[in-house]
């Protein structure tokens, strides 16, 4: 399970149950949180640096699911 203080707690199983629209919304939200975390880190205001790693992993999982969905639609 992936966790960080911004309450981004997602497992791959949880993500796979979401629709494509939900995944797209979560992707943009997580990217925004990652952007904010990077700015805070640059200004030495970020307490938990692990947030950046967790956000990147969640983004990677979402993109993986979106690409898998596209491939299954193309092969059907």
Image (cartoon, helix red, strand yellow):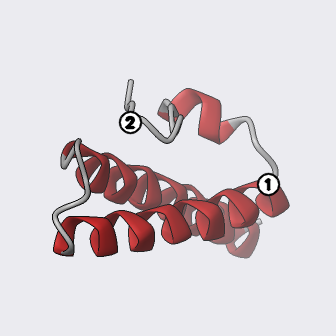
Determine the secondary structure under disc 2.
Answer: loop
Q: Residues within 10 Å of mark 2 (few under 14, many from 20)?
A: some
The quadrant the N terminus occupies is top left
The residue under the point 33% across, 51% down is 57
The residue under the point 21% across, 65% down is 41
Q: How many marks?
A: 2
Q: Residue furthest top?
A: 1
Q: Which residue is mark 1?
A: 22
The residue under the point 79% across, 54% down is 22
Q: Nearer the viewer, residue 45 or 39?
A: 45
* Left or right: residue 42 compared with residue 40: left
* Left or right: residue 24 compared with residue 51: right
Q: Nearer the viewer, residue 8 or 23?
A: 8
Horizontal and vertical percent position of residue 63:
51, 65
Q: Residues within 10 Å of mark 1 (few under 14, many from 20)?
A: few
Q: Nearer the viewer, residue 40 or 35?
A: 40
Horizontal and vertical percent position of residue 38:
29, 71
Horizontal and vertical percent position of residue 51:
31, 47
Q: CA distance from mark 1 to mark 2?
A: 20 Å
Earlier sequence position, callout 1 versus callout 2: 2
Determine the secondary structure under disc 1.
Answer: helix
Q: Which residue is mark 2?
A: 4
Labelled pair 1, 2 in contact (Cβ < 8 Å): no
* Left or right: residue 3 compared with residue 9: left
Q: Nearer the viewer, residue 69 or 38?
A: 38
Horizontal and vertical percent position of residue 7:
53, 34
């Amino acid at each position: 399970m992936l966790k960080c203080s911004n309450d981004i707690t997602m497992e791959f199983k949880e993500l796979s149950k979401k629709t494509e629209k939900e995944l797209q919304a979560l992707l943009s939200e997580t990217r925004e949180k990652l952007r904010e975390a990077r700015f805070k880190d640059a200004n030495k205001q970020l307490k938990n640096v692990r947030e950046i790693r967790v956000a990147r992993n969640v983004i990677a999982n979402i993109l993986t699911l979106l690409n898998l969905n596209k491939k299954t639609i193309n092969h059907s």
